[in-house]
Image (spheres, rainbow, N blue to C red):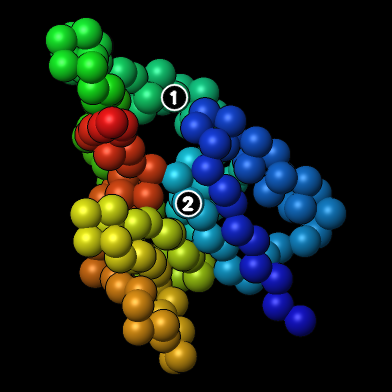
Amino acid sequence: MKLGIALSGGGIRGIAHAGVLKALEDNNIKPDIIGGTSSGSLVASLYAMGYSPYYIFLLFKRYAKDMVSVDPVPIIGGLKEFLVNKKIGLSGFNKGDSIETEYNELAYRKGIKKISDIKFPLVITSVDIKRAKEYIFTNNIPDAKDENIGYIKDISIGKAVRASSSFPRNILSL
């Protein structure tokens, strides 16, 4: 029997996934495939690249503030839009540049340039909300593919986790 593990989102609370992976390791349980979305993709990709759960914890602790920073200027602009036009339009969350850069650097340390270079089966999910299309970034494309899902192997780790953990620039527009 094969074991797969799917890690959910949850922002900075996604670090709890490193604890789950550590508990599995401590009990000699190793998944055969790992996947994640949003913050789960951050942990899943590091694990698939060969980083230990403890080291993943240390990386989150070190880089969390940089990766989740907020640009307040567009948010203030969104509040102004609400006051003037009675529309809610919040934007300004981190564009993801730092996540992409940091994850590409972590991948390069392991000799990995693209998701297809990772040996451990990995699945990272994402959605293109503009086109209403699901995408799966993976090094393990299944034989029986869903035609409604785009499967991508030729992408950097940084770009894949950035896509999975991104917010739309305009979150609400009423």
| Residue visible at 53% across and 60% down in the picture | 35
* Left or right relative to 102: residue 145: right
Residue 73 appears left or right of 51: left
Circle on res. 97:
none
Q: Which amino acid does label 1 sit on?
A: Ala
Hey, what amino acid is under mark 2? Thr
N-terminal of the two: label 1 or label 2?
2
On-image quarter of the C terminus: top left
Vertical order, 94 against 99 (above or below): above
Residue nearest the viewer, comparing 75 with 111? 75
For the point 27% across and 56% down, which residue is it? 128
Residue at the front extreme, as displayed: 86
Q: Residue 37 carries which label?
A: 2
In the image, 13 versus 107, the foreground residue is 13
Q: Quadrant of the N terminus?
A: bottom right
User: Which residue is the site of mark 1?
Assistant: 64
